Image: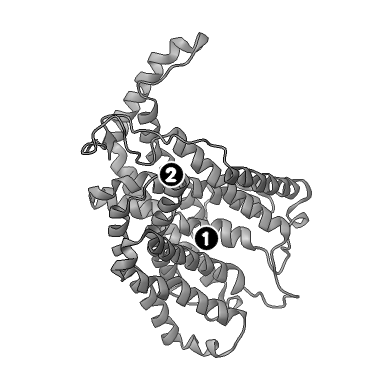
Amino acid sequence: MVHFMKPTPLVQKKFITPGVILLILLAVNGLAFLAGRFLFGIGGVTNLNNQYPWGIWIGVDVAAGVALAAGGFTTAALGHLMHREQYHALVRPALLTAMLGYTFVALGVCIDIGRYYYIWHPLIMWNGNSALFEVGICVMIYMNVLYIEFLPVVTERFIGRVTMKGFLTRFNKPVDKLLRALDRGLSKVMFIFIIAGVVLSTLHQSSLGTLMVIAGPKMHPLWQTPVLPLLFLLSAIAVGFPMVIFESMIAARSFGLKPEMETLSKLGRMIAPILGIYLAFKIGDMFIRETFVYLTTFNTASVLFMIEVFVGVVLPLRMFLSRSVLKSPVMLFIAASLVVFGVLLNRINNFVVAYTPPYSFGSYFPSIGEISVTVGFVSILVLLYRAAVMIFPVISVPDKSLSSKAKYTIRG
Protein backbone atom coordinates (compact mmCIF):
# COMPACT_ATOMS: atom_id res chain seq x y z
CA MET A 1 0.00 0.00 0.00
CA VAL A 2 1.21 3.53 -0.74
CA HIS A 3 1.30 6.29 1.87
CA PHE A 4 2.32 9.89 1.28
CA MET A 5 4.71 11.31 3.87
CA LYS A 6 3.27 14.74 3.21
CA PRO A 7 -0.45 15.24 2.50
CA THR A 8 -0.97 15.11 -1.24
CA PRO A 9 -1.96 18.49 -2.73
CA LEU A 10 -5.62 18.66 -3.69
CA VAL A 11 -7.03 19.83 -7.00
CA GLN A 12 -7.69 23.56 -6.75
CA LYS A 13 -10.45 24.31 -9.25
CA LYS A 14 -13.95 25.72 -9.20
CA PHE A 15 -16.54 23.00 -8.97
CA ILE A 16 -19.22 24.80 -10.98
CA THR A 17 -18.46 25.16 -14.68
CA PRO A 18 -20.71 25.26 -17.76
CA GLY A 19 -20.11 21.53 -18.23
CA VAL A 20 -21.04 20.83 -14.62
CA ILE A 21 -24.26 22.83 -15.01
CA LEU A 22 -25.17 20.70 -18.04
CA LEU A 23 -24.45 17.53 -16.06
CA ILE A 24 -26.65 18.75 -13.21
CA LEU A 25 -29.54 19.37 -15.62
CA LEU A 26 -29.14 15.88 -17.11
CA ALA A 27 -28.98 14.40 -13.61
CA VAL A 28 -32.16 16.20 -12.51
CA ASN A 29 -33.95 15.03 -15.67
CA GLY A 30 -32.89 11.44 -14.97
CA LEU A 31 -33.98 11.66 -11.33
CA ALA A 32 -37.40 12.94 -12.43
CA PHE A 33 -37.96 9.86 -14.61
CA LEU A 34 -36.54 7.69 -11.82
CA ALA A 35 -39.16 9.11 -9.47
CA GLY A 36 -41.78 8.19 -12.07
CA ARG A 37 -40.47 4.64 -12.12
CA PHE A 38 -41.03 4.28 -8.36
CA LEU A 39 -44.37 6.10 -8.38
CA PHE A 40 -45.98 4.44 -11.41
CA GLY A 41 -44.07 1.18 -11.68
CA ILE A 42 -41.39 0.02 -14.07
CA GLY A 43 -43.87 -0.11 -16.96
CA GLY A 44 -44.69 3.56 -16.50
CA VAL A 45 -41.38 4.84 -17.87
CA THR A 46 -39.91 1.90 -19.83
CA ASN A 47 -40.70 -0.16 -22.92
CA LEU A 48 -40.05 -3.41 -21.06
CA ASN A 49 -42.67 -6.17 -21.15
CA ASN A 50 -43.05 -9.92 -20.59
CA GLN A 51 -41.12 -10.70 -23.79
CA TYR A 52 -38.35 -8.19 -23.09
CA PRO A 53 -37.88 -8.14 -19.31
CA TRP A 54 -34.61 -6.21 -19.45
CA GLY A 55 -33.19 -3.42 -21.57
CA ILE A 56 -30.47 -0.79 -21.36
CA TRP A 57 -30.73 -0.55 -17.58
CA ILE A 58 -29.23 -4.05 -17.49
CA GLY A 59 -27.21 -3.88 -20.72
CA VAL A 60 -25.62 -0.48 -20.02
CA ASP A 61 -26.04 0.43 -16.35
CA VAL A 62 -25.20 -3.04 -15.02
CA ALA A 63 -23.36 -5.23 -17.56
CA ALA A 64 -21.38 -2.43 -19.22
CA GLY A 65 -20.92 -0.63 -15.89
CA VAL A 66 -19.32 -3.69 -14.33
CA ALA A 67 -17.00 -4.15 -17.31
CA LEU A 68 -15.92 -0.50 -17.49
CA ALA A 69 -15.18 -0.50 -13.76
CA ALA A 70 -12.60 -3.23 -14.34
CA GLY A 71 -9.80 -0.67 -14.19
CA GLY A 72 -10.05 -0.94 -10.42
CA PHE A 73 -8.95 -4.55 -10.12
CA THR A 74 -6.54 -4.51 -13.09
CA THR A 75 -4.56 -1.51 -11.78
CA ALA A 76 -4.69 -2.88 -8.23
CA ALA A 77 -3.21 -6.14 -9.48
CA LEU A 78 -0.58 -4.27 -11.48
CA GLY A 79 0.39 -1.73 -8.84
CA HIS A 80 0.09 -3.77 -5.64
CA LEU A 81 0.23 -7.48 -6.42
CA MET A 82 2.87 -7.17 -9.16
CA HIS A 83 4.65 -4.32 -7.32
CA ARG A 84 4.97 -2.09 -10.38
CA GLU A 85 5.63 1.07 -8.38
CA GLN A 86 5.57 3.42 -11.37
CA TYR A 87 1.83 2.84 -11.79
CA HIS A 88 0.81 3.74 -8.23
CA ALA A 89 -0.28 7.23 -9.35
CA LEU A 90 -3.00 5.60 -11.48
CA VAL A 91 -4.35 3.28 -8.79
CA ARG A 92 -6.34 5.82 -6.78
CA PRO A 93 -8.25 7.37 -9.72
CA ALA A 94 -9.01 3.88 -11.02
CA LEU A 95 -10.15 2.82 -7.54
CA LEU A 96 -12.46 5.82 -7.28
CA THR A 97 -13.93 5.13 -10.73
CA ALA A 98 -14.52 1.47 -9.83
CA MET A 99 -16.06 2.36 -6.47
CA LEU A 100 -18.53 4.80 -8.00
CA GLY A 101 -19.16 2.48 -10.94
CA TYR A 102 -20.08 -0.49 -8.76
CA THR A 103 -22.26 1.71 -6.57
CA PHE A 104 -24.31 2.71 -9.59
CA VAL A 105 -24.34 -0.88 -10.83
CA ALA A 106 -26.04 -1.85 -7.57
CA LEU A 107 -28.51 1.03 -7.97
CA GLY A 108 -29.13 -0.05 -11.57
CA VAL A 109 -30.06 -3.56 -10.44
CA CYS A 110 -32.34 -2.11 -7.77
CA ILE A 111 -34.35 0.06 -10.16
CA ASP A 112 -34.55 -2.63 -12.86
CA ILE A 113 -36.19 -5.36 -10.79
CA GLY A 114 -39.94 -5.00 -10.47
CA ARG A 115 -40.12 -5.55 -6.71
CA TYR A 116 -37.12 -3.43 -5.78
CA TYR A 117 -37.96 -3.72 -2.08
CA TYR A 118 -36.86 -7.38 -2.24
CA ILE A 119 -33.32 -6.47 -3.26
CA TRP A 120 -32.10 -7.82 0.10
CA HIS A 121 -33.36 -11.37 -0.58
CA PRO A 122 -30.05 -12.75 -1.99
CA LEU A 123 -28.39 -11.94 1.33
CA ILE A 124 -30.72 -14.33 3.14
CA MET A 125 -32.07 -16.73 0.50
CA TRP A 126 -28.92 -18.29 -0.92
CA ASN A 127 -29.03 -20.34 -4.11
CA GLY A 128 -25.60 -21.69 -4.95
CA ASN A 129 -26.82 -23.08 -8.29
CA SER A 130 -27.75 -19.64 -9.64
CA ALA A 131 -25.32 -17.68 -11.80
CA LEU A 132 -27.27 -14.52 -11.03
CA PHE A 133 -26.85 -15.18 -7.30
CA GLU A 134 -23.09 -15.48 -7.78
CA VAL A 135 -23.02 -12.19 -9.68
CA GLY A 136 -25.10 -10.41 -7.05
CA ILE A 137 -23.11 -11.66 -4.06
CA CYS A 138 -19.71 -10.98 -5.67
CA VAL A 139 -20.72 -7.48 -6.81
CA MET A 140 -22.05 -6.66 -3.35
CA ILE A 141 -18.94 -7.95 -1.55
CA TYR A 142 -16.57 -6.33 -4.04
CA MET A 143 -18.35 -2.99 -3.71
CA ASN A 144 -17.71 -3.11 0.05
CA VAL A 145 -14.10 -4.12 -0.61
CA LEU A 146 -13.69 -1.05 -2.84
CA TYR A 147 -14.96 1.23 -0.10
CA ILE A 148 -12.50 -0.36 2.34
CA GLU A 149 -9.67 0.10 -0.17
CA PHE A 150 -10.63 3.79 -0.43
CA LEU A 151 -10.45 4.34 3.35
CA PRO A 152 -6.67 5.09 3.34
CA VAL A 153 -7.43 8.02 1.03
CA VAL A 154 -9.94 9.31 3.58
CA THR A 155 -7.56 8.89 6.52
CA GLU A 156 -4.76 10.64 4.62
CA ARG A 157 -7.08 13.56 3.92
CA PHE A 158 -8.23 14.12 7.50
CA ILE A 159 -5.40 12.93 9.77
CA GLY A 160 -4.15 16.05 11.57
CA ARG A 161 -6.91 18.10 9.96
CA VAL A 162 -9.92 17.31 12.15
CA THR A 163 -11.15 20.79 13.13
CA MET A 164 -14.77 20.49 14.15
CA LYS A 165 -16.21 23.65 15.70
CA GLY A 166 -18.50 24.45 18.62
CA PHE A 167 -19.52 21.71 21.02
CA LEU A 168 -17.97 19.15 18.64
CA THR A 169 -14.48 20.44 19.42
CA ARG A 170 -14.12 17.87 22.20
CA PHE A 171 -14.27 15.11 19.58
CA ASN A 172 -11.37 16.42 17.47
CA LYS A 173 -8.61 14.48 19.26
CA PRO A 174 -10.58 11.22 19.63
CA VAL A 175 -11.55 11.27 15.95
CA ASP A 176 -7.96 12.00 14.93
CA LYS A 177 -6.72 9.10 17.07
CA LEU A 178 -9.36 6.87 15.52
CA LEU A 179 -8.24 7.85 12.02
CA ARG A 180 -4.60 7.15 12.87
CA ALA A 181 -5.46 3.77 14.37
CA LEU A 182 -7.58 2.94 11.32
CA ASP A 183 -4.75 3.88 8.98
CA ARG A 184 -2.26 1.72 10.89
CA GLY A 185 -4.65 -1.21 10.94
CA LEU A 186 -5.49 -0.94 7.27
CA SER A 187 -1.82 -0.82 6.28
CA LYS A 188 -1.38 -4.28 7.83
CA VAL A 189 -4.41 -6.00 6.29
CA MET A 190 -4.99 -4.09 3.04
CA PHE A 191 -3.25 -6.79 0.99
CA ILE A 192 -6.08 -9.16 1.95
CA PHE A 193 -8.72 -6.84 0.50
CA ILE A 194 -6.66 -6.19 -2.64
CA ILE A 195 -6.35 -9.91 -3.33
CA ALA A 196 -10.04 -10.43 -2.51
CA GLY A 197 -10.99 -7.64 -4.91
CA VAL A 198 -9.05 -9.20 -7.79
CA VAL A 199 -10.50 -12.67 -7.14
CA LEU A 200 -14.08 -11.43 -6.77
CA SER A 201 -13.81 -9.40 -9.97
CA THR A 202 -12.72 -12.38 -12.05
CA LEU A 203 -15.66 -14.37 -10.66
CA HIS A 204 -18.52 -12.02 -11.41
CA GLN A 205 -17.08 -10.70 -14.69
CA SER A 206 -17.22 -14.23 -16.10
CA SER A 207 -20.57 -15.08 -14.47
CA LEU A 208 -22.24 -12.25 -16.35
CA GLY A 209 -21.42 -14.22 -19.49
CA THR A 210 -22.91 -17.33 -17.90
CA LEU A 211 -26.24 -15.52 -17.66
CA MET A 212 -26.40 -15.20 -21.43
CA VAL A 213 -25.25 -18.80 -21.99
CA ILE A 214 -28.35 -19.84 -20.04
CA ALA A 215 -30.46 -17.80 -22.49
CA GLY A 216 -29.68 -20.48 -25.10
CA PRO A 217 -31.53 -20.09 -28.42
CA LYS A 218 -32.94 -16.75 -27.32
CA MET A 219 -29.56 -15.26 -28.25
CA HIS A 220 -28.24 -14.67 -31.74
CA PRO A 221 -25.59 -17.28 -32.74
CA LEU A 222 -22.98 -14.58 -33.33
CA TRP A 223 -22.80 -14.05 -29.57
CA GLN A 224 -24.23 -17.26 -28.11
CA THR A 225 -21.31 -19.52 -27.24
CA PRO A 226 -20.31 -21.83 -24.36
CA VAL A 227 -17.12 -19.79 -23.90
CA LEU A 228 -19.03 -16.56 -23.34
CA PRO A 229 -17.95 -16.42 -19.65
CA LEU A 230 -14.30 -16.52 -20.79
CA LEU A 231 -14.93 -13.84 -23.42
CA PHE A 232 -16.62 -11.62 -20.82
CA LEU A 233 -13.66 -12.01 -18.47
CA LEU A 234 -11.07 -11.36 -21.19
CA SER A 235 -12.92 -8.31 -22.49
CA ALA A 236 -13.17 -6.89 -18.95
CA ILE A 237 -9.42 -7.35 -18.46
CA ALA A 238 -8.77 -5.85 -21.90
CA VAL A 239 -10.79 -2.70 -21.15
CA GLY A 240 -9.24 -2.17 -17.70
CA PHE A 241 -6.13 -0.24 -18.75
CA PRO A 242 -7.83 1.65 -21.63
CA MET A 243 -10.48 2.81 -19.14
CA VAL A 244 -7.72 4.09 -16.84
CA ILE A 245 -6.17 6.01 -19.75
CA PHE A 246 -9.59 7.31 -20.82
CA GLU A 247 -10.44 8.53 -17.30
CA SER A 248 -6.96 9.94 -16.65
CA MET A 249 -6.93 11.96 -19.88
CA ILE A 250 -10.40 13.43 -19.29
CA ALA A 251 -9.60 14.28 -15.66
CA ALA A 252 -6.34 15.96 -16.64
CA ARG A 253 -8.13 18.05 -19.28
CA SER A 254 -10.97 18.94 -16.93
CA PHE A 255 -8.67 20.08 -14.11
CA GLY A 256 -6.06 21.74 -16.30
CA LEU A 257 -3.34 19.22 -15.44
CA LYS A 258 -0.63 17.79 -17.65
CA PRO A 259 -1.36 14.17 -18.66
CA GLU A 260 1.05 11.67 -17.13
CA MET A 261 2.15 10.53 -20.57
CA GLU A 262 5.25 8.68 -19.38
CA THR A 263 3.14 6.37 -17.21
CA LEU A 264 0.18 6.17 -19.58
CA SER A 265 2.39 5.29 -22.54
CA LYS A 266 3.93 2.42 -20.61
CA LEU A 267 0.46 1.27 -19.67
CA GLY A 268 -0.60 1.48 -23.31
CA ARG A 269 2.13 -0.96 -24.34
CA MET A 270 0.44 -3.68 -22.29
CA ILE A 271 -2.94 -3.29 -23.96
CA ALA A 272 -2.16 -4.70 -27.42
CA PRO A 273 -1.20 -8.22 -26.20
CA ILE A 274 -4.34 -8.40 -24.02
CA LEU A 275 -6.54 -7.26 -26.91
CA GLY A 276 -4.80 -9.79 -29.14
CA ILE A 277 -5.63 -12.65 -26.76
CA TYR A 278 -9.27 -11.55 -26.57
CA LEU A 279 -9.50 -11.20 -30.36
CA ALA A 280 -7.94 -14.63 -30.90
CA PHE A 281 -10.48 -16.32 -28.64
CA LYS A 282 -13.40 -14.41 -30.16
CA ILE A 283 -12.50 -15.07 -33.80
CA GLY A 284 -11.36 -18.62 -33.04
CA ASP A 285 -14.66 -19.41 -31.38
CA MET A 286 -16.55 -17.95 -34.35
CA PHE A 287 -14.70 -20.20 -36.81
CA ILE A 288 -15.01 -23.30 -34.62
CA ARG A 289 -18.78 -22.82 -34.43
CA GLU A 290 -18.88 -21.62 -38.08
CA THR A 291 -21.07 -18.67 -37.15
CA PHE A 292 -19.26 -16.48 -39.67
CA VAL A 293 -21.97 -17.50 -42.13
CA TYR A 294 -24.31 -15.08 -40.34
CA LEU A 295 -22.08 -12.21 -41.41
CA THR A 296 -23.12 -12.75 -45.03
CA THR A 297 -26.60 -11.51 -44.15
CA PHE A 298 -26.87 -7.74 -43.96
CA ASN A 299 -28.91 -6.95 -40.85
CA THR A 300 -28.61 -5.18 -37.51
CA ALA A 301 -26.85 -8.09 -35.79
CA SER A 302 -24.18 -8.58 -38.46
CA VAL A 303 -23.45 -4.84 -38.77
CA LEU A 304 -23.13 -4.31 -35.02
CA PHE A 305 -20.95 -7.42 -34.67
CA MET A 306 -18.57 -6.11 -37.34
CA ILE A 307 -18.45 -2.67 -35.71
CA GLU A 308 -17.81 -4.27 -32.32
CA VAL A 309 -14.89 -6.36 -33.60
CA PHE A 310 -13.23 -4.03 -36.09
CA VAL A 311 -13.81 -0.64 -34.47
CA GLY A 312 -13.67 -1.82 -30.87
CA VAL A 313 -10.85 -4.39 -31.08
CA VAL A 314 -8.91 -4.60 -34.36
CA LEU A 315 -8.43 -0.86 -34.93
CA PRO A 316 -7.29 0.03 -31.39
CA LEU A 317 -5.10 -3.11 -31.35
CA ARG A 318 -3.26 -1.79 -34.38
CA MET A 319 -3.05 1.69 -32.83
CA PHE A 320 -1.56 0.44 -29.56
CA LEU A 321 1.18 -1.31 -31.56
CA SER A 322 2.30 2.07 -32.94
CA ARG A 323 4.98 4.03 -31.06
CA SER A 324 3.68 7.32 -32.47
CA VAL A 325 0.25 6.59 -31.00
CA LEU A 326 1.72 5.78 -27.58
CA LYS A 327 3.61 9.09 -27.57
CA SER A 328 0.66 11.23 -28.69
CA PRO A 329 -1.91 12.22 -26.01
CA VAL A 330 -4.65 12.66 -28.61
CA MET A 331 -4.04 9.38 -30.43
CA LEU A 332 -3.59 7.48 -27.17
CA PHE A 333 -6.91 8.85 -25.93
CA ILE A 334 -8.63 7.88 -29.21
CA ALA A 335 -7.25 4.35 -29.05
CA ALA A 336 -8.38 3.93 -25.44
CA SER A 337 -11.81 5.39 -26.28
CA LEU A 338 -12.26 2.85 -29.07
CA VAL A 339 -11.65 -0.04 -26.67
CA VAL A 340 -14.11 1.45 -24.17
CA PHE A 341 -16.64 1.87 -26.98
CA GLY A 342 -16.06 -1.70 -28.17
CA VAL A 343 -16.70 -3.28 -24.76
CA LEU A 344 -19.71 -1.04 -24.19
CA LEU A 345 -21.13 -2.12 -27.55
CA ASN A 346 -20.31 -5.75 -26.78
CA ARG A 347 -22.41 -5.66 -23.61
CA ILE A 348 -25.27 -3.90 -25.39
CA ASN A 349 -25.08 -6.47 -28.20
CA ASN A 350 -25.15 -9.41 -25.78
CA PHE A 351 -27.88 -8.18 -23.46
CA VAL A 352 -30.08 -6.19 -25.86
CA VAL A 353 -29.36 -6.73 -29.57
CA ALA A 354 -28.67 -10.49 -29.51
CA TYR A 355 -31.53 -11.25 -27.12
CA THR A 356 -34.68 -12.18 -29.07
CA PRO A 357 -37.20 -14.21 -27.06
CA PRO A 358 -39.43 -16.71 -28.90
CA TYR A 359 -43.00 -15.68 -29.65
CA SER A 360 -42.11 -12.04 -29.14
CA PHE A 361 -44.34 -9.37 -30.61
CA GLY A 362 -42.36 -6.54 -32.15
CA SER A 363 -38.91 -5.52 -30.93
CA TYR A 364 -37.46 -3.60 -28.01
CA PHE A 365 -36.17 -0.06 -28.16
CA PRO A 366 -35.48 1.97 -25.00
CA SER A 367 -37.94 4.68 -24.05
CA ILE A 368 -37.08 8.30 -23.34
CA GLY A 369 -37.41 7.48 -19.64
CA GLU A 370 -34.88 4.63 -19.81
CA ILE A 371 -32.38 6.73 -21.73
CA SER A 372 -32.88 9.68 -19.38
CA VAL A 373 -32.26 7.58 -16.27
CA THR A 374 -29.11 6.04 -17.77
CA VAL A 375 -27.76 9.43 -18.86
CA GLY A 376 -28.70 10.84 -15.46
CA PHE A 377 -26.80 8.08 -13.68
CA VAL A 378 -23.69 8.72 -15.77
CA SER A 379 -23.98 12.46 -15.07
CA ILE A 380 -24.26 11.91 -11.31
CA LEU A 381 -21.27 9.56 -11.42
CA VAL A 382 -19.15 12.21 -13.16
CA LEU A 383 -20.29 14.88 -10.68
CA LEU A 384 -19.42 12.67 -7.71
CA TYR A 385 -16.03 11.86 -9.25
CA ARG A 386 -15.31 15.56 -9.68
CA ALA A 387 -16.35 16.30 -6.10
CA ALA A 388 -14.31 13.40 -4.68
CA VAL A 389 -11.19 14.46 -6.57
CA MET A 390 -11.50 17.98 -5.17
CA ILE A 391 -12.07 16.75 -1.59
CA PHE A 392 -9.69 13.78 -1.35
CA PRO A 393 -6.07 13.26 -2.52
CA VAL A 394 -6.90 11.08 -5.52
CA ILE A 395 -5.10 12.66 -8.47
CA SER A 396 -1.37 13.40 -8.33
CA VAL A 397 -0.98 17.18 -8.32
CA PRO A 398 2.44 18.86 -8.38
CA ASP A 399 3.27 20.38 -4.99
CA LYS A 400 4.48 23.92 -5.66
CA SER A 401 6.08 24.06 -2.22
CA LEU A 402 8.59 21.37 -3.22
CA SER A 403 11.39 21.45 -5.74
CA SER A 404 10.84 20.09 -9.22
CA LYS A 405 13.06 17.10 -8.38
CA ALA A 406 11.01 16.11 -5.32
CA LYS A 407 7.39 16.94 -6.06
CA TYR A 408 6.12 13.54 -4.97
CA THR A 409 7.50 11.87 -1.89
CA ILE A 410 6.19 8.32 -1.46
CA ARG A 411 7.10 5.62 0.97
CA GLY A 412 6.12 1.98 0.55
Q: Which mark is on residue 256? A: 2
Q: Position of residue 168 (x, y in %)?
A: 49, 12
Q: Is residue 300 left or right of residue 203?
A: right
Give the structural element (helix, strand or loop) at label 2: loop
Residue 10 position (above or below residue 285): above
SS at circle 1: helix
Residue under label 1:
64
> Going by the image, does 394 lie left or right of 363?
left
> In this figure, which colouring scheme has been used for the structure?
one colour
Q: Work out whether residue 223 can be spotted.
A: no
- From the viewer's perspective, is residue 51 above or below residue 291? above
Please, what is the three-letter code of the amino acid marked with disc 2?
Gly
What residue is at 40 percent from the left and 32 percent from the top? 154
Quadrant holding the C terminus:
top left
Q: Position of residue 127 (x, y in %)?
A: 52, 56
Residue shown at 29% from the left, 64% from the top: 269
**Amino acid residing under circle 1:** Ala
Q: Residue at x 46, y 11 (%)?
A: 169
Q: Is residue 60 left or right of residue 92?
A: right
x then y, percent, for residue 160: 35, 20
